[in-house]
Image: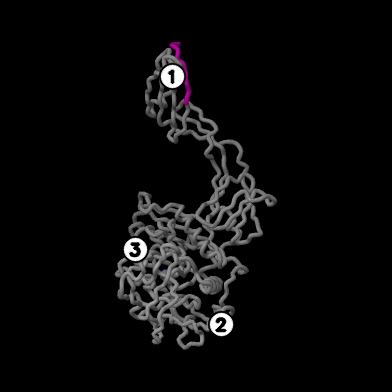
Amino acid sequence: MLTKGISVYHFYFFMMKKLIIILLLLPFLAYSQITGSCDFIPTPNMLDASKYSTTLRSDFSTDDPIVFNVYYHLINPSDGINPDGITEDHILASIAQLNINFNQYNIFYKYRGYRTIDDDVLYYDTDHSQYFDLLNLETDYADSINVMIIPTYVAAGGALFQEQYVKMPAWNFANILIGNTTITHEFGHLAGLMHPFRGTSASSETIFNDVCPPILDVTYSNEYLITPGTYTSASENVTRDANSSYFNAAVTGDMVIDTPAQFYHATYNFCKNLTTGEITYISHPDIIDNSGTDEPYIDVDIQNFMAYGYMGKIHFTNGQGVRMRETILDPTNTEFTPRMTVVSALYEPYKNYLGAGDIVISIEDLGNGFLLVCRNIVNLDYFQPGFDYDFYLDANSDPFDSFTAGYDVPIFNNTYQIGTKIYQLDDSSIVFTSGVCARGQICVEEAIGSGKVLTFTNYNNPNYTEQTLDSIQASDPNLIQQLENNKYHHIEKTSIKGNKVEETIYKTDN
Ligand SMILES: [Zn+2]
């Protein structure tokens, strides 16, 4: 019987090959596209029972933090325009999501930035197996987990364990701002997790429609599928009685004992309460495991990040947390160490901008077709989103700002020092990074793009004539000489960046 506390099981493992390729397909894709969708082939190391404890535990807070560098590659057509509208906002949201979902296991992800590759050859190449080489990931980016955002990719995501890289189709990555969790699923694979339904087939047959009562959201389950049609040798039985001869949770399926037995098309057999949001699996006596005892599936966990389907995914299990940590810390899994970094890196801004701020201090017409625009100087530190933060100016005062783990990016003008507390790491430490004394101003020349002249006969007379100027007219050093004598002229010149100088003169004839 599986009880709380410490339970020990023996792990048995199947012969497996080295390469791990996982593809997650969305259920609304035609099933003909699912071929080879989740070819998960763990390394021999992962199959060595001596490498994994079978201890169930729920508190990871005293485990040493593990920190990975993550770098992104955004592939666009040669014109540089991303058809799916992917920006750094999406990338930052994915880093935040990863940390929100993995930090409880003391696994962290340090954002190391992204690059854009504007290249039609890569953009239209549907053979993504070449990307690892084409993007020089092995030579130039071997110190990071790499995420490739690929446009021409019909699967919802993919991951290669030994190369430690993830493939995300741009159309799906664009959904991250509305809660898509595919990237969490793929990073689960990178840390050694398998699908909980592993060993059940994709074949299915609809046995009845509209299984959900009217008050429930039938868009989540408008049909009930009799699945799996067939099993492979690695399907997991429902029983959690460790003394049962049918108990095989440690050696089949995802080999994690606290993830309930699941089948491939389970996603169709759920209802969602529109009021509470609760997801309920609808058990059925015909939907049974492969034990031969007619055991129906009961506690199917469709909201596990490693499950398939389009319902909201919200958790890993603690058993998955244990397995991820033990996979990562296994010294014979050599994929991980080169991609790790120090904990202190998480306190460092991921980006700094030292330069002109938003405040315009002065604008001067240089008389040569340019305006000299002077702005304040700022030293902006950008902190990656996804942690519960407090920010301090000194250790003895209250924080000047706080953030709750989410997608908002903390950005501060750091002119002396900024102290950072990350609750997910250590709620007793404040780590300071020094700033730059940013006094003075930065002046740049901006070309004059347009202008206008308002001409008055009397300064108090509301009637005037208006002449609009193009860039050549507004830049003309002889502009004033060409204006009418004995009248007032209000002259405006606007730079191509929208900064404006204006003056009013009275022109005499001498
Ligand atoms: Zn997968």
- The reply to whether the magenta stretch includes residue 233 is no
Q: What element carries label 2?
A: loop
Q: Where is residue 250 in the image (x, y as percent from the top left)?
A: 49, 81
Which residue in the structure is indicated by mark 3?
154
Q: What element carries label 3?
A: loop
Q: Which residue is drawn at 44% across and 36% down?
A: 497
Q: At label 1, which amino acid type do we have?
A: His
Which residue in the structure is indicated by mark 2?
8
Characterize the magenta stretch by its predominant secondary structure: strand
Q: Where is residue 265 in the image (x, y as percent from the top left)?
A: 36, 73
In this view, the residue in front, 208 or 353, is: 208
Q: Which contiguous range is marked in magenta? A: 502-510
Q: At label 3, which amino acid type do we have?
A: Val
Q: Which residue is drawn at 35% across and 77% down?
A: 227
Which residue in the structure is indicated by mark 1?
489
Q: Along the polypeptide, which appears first: circle 3 or circle 2?
A: 2
Q: Position of residue 431 (x, y in %)?
A: 64, 55
Q: Along the polypeptide, which appears first: circle 2 or circle 1?
A: 2
Q: At label 2, which amino acid type do we have?
A: Val
Neighbourhood count class around disc 2 (C-alpha, 10 Å): few under 14, some 14–19, many 20 upward: few
User: Height in image: 56 above or below 445?
Assistant: below
Q: Is residue 45 visible?
A: no
User: Height in image: 490 above or below 405?
Assistant: above
Q: Distance between the residues labelled 2 and 1?
A: 90 Å
- Residue 201 sits in quarter: bottom left
